[in-house]
Amino acid sequence: MRNYNIEMWKYAKELKTQDPVLGHVHKKNKESTLQNIEIKLNSLGMRSPEPNPDKKKILFIGSSISLGWGIENEESFAEILNTKLNEDGLNYQVLNASVGNYNTFRYVENFLRNQTAIDPEIIVINYFLNDAEILPMGSGNFLLKNSELAASLTIAIKKMLANNNKGLQEHYNALYDPENEGFQIMENSLAKLAQYAKSKEIKVYLVMIPDIHFLQDYPFLPVHNKMKAISKNYGFEFIDLFDTLENVNFDQLQIIPGDSHPNEYGHKLIGNKLSEVLIRDLK
């Protein structure tokens, strides 16, 4: 089936396991076909080949966009970078630790709790606008976990209730208020990562991913500017993908109707931009 909501439900059921701190983590050595695409997880729970001990590591952290939801792994921007590094003879491997339905707190904590043994030279934070939101912990409801019908009805009800929410621009203005709890948790998580990275001499990039719905008249640049300032404050290199995707029509980037993740073309644009910046810096 190519129904986004049901396929995301299947993703949670087949490739995730509950975690008391992070809500969920990826299972290890598991695979599933979701939206007609195979998602295969390695022994570390990453959508990557096994780590190559002879190569330095670039670690991607983020959520479902950088996971490469809905597209073949070799067409994801993580693997595009990996391929271009190899073509340039640079001795690096990209490992993709992104997990769907993660926010900044979750992907930073997942790294600090479970992935520091990778000892990356570089960490790439793939940051999306909603990564400052506070995510509820999974309820563990047996019916929702095991019934596709129950999941479908729940999704429909949530969509109806969402019509009563404030506009998206208002929502993000409130979310990125320094007094907002979600904003504070996000910034504290980045501060924690910055402290660790400094102690281990790890270079960190923060990649700002725009909402592809609004590229023609983009209303969220103030949020991008706030994240740029935060990145500078913590010594991160900031890469804003708005310029890369500006004025591209949503229809050219949408993967399937009802799914707002970028398609292969979007990943190609992003992968080429990241490759240009990182390969230049590494050289």
Image (tube, grey):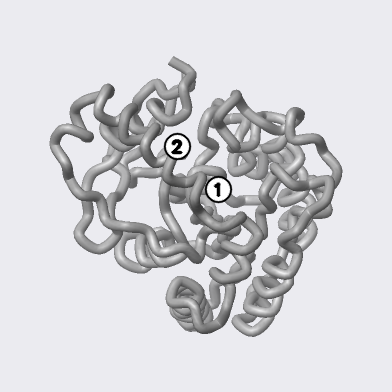
Q: Secondary structure at mark 1?
A: strand
Structural distance between the alpha carbons of marks 1 and 2: 9 Å
Residue at 76 percent of width and 43 percent of height: 272
Amino acid type shown at disc 2: Pro
Left or right of residue 8: residue 173: right
Residue denoted by label 2: 49
Residue furthest left in the image: 142
Residue at 71 percent of width and 41 percent of height: 84
Say which mark, if any, is on residue 93: 1
Q: Is residue 55 above or below residue 83?
A: below
Q: Secondary structure at mark 2?
A: loop
Pick the front one: 45 or 157: 157
Q: Earlier in the sequence, mark 1 or mark 2?
A: 2
Left or right of residue 240: residue 230: left
Residue at 57 percent of width and 77 percent of height: 177
Q: Is residue 267 above or below residue 105?
A: above
Residue 8: give x, y in percent of width and height: 40, 33
- Residues marked 1 and 2 touching at CB (< 8 Å): yes
Q: Is residue 194 above or below residue 256?
A: below
Pick the front one: 47 or 247: 247
Residue 111: give x, y in percent of width and height: 39, 62
Pick the front one: 277 or 184: 184
Q: How many numbered marks appear?
A: 2
Q: Determine the image quadrant of residue 236.
A: bottom right
Amino acid type shown at disc 1: Gln
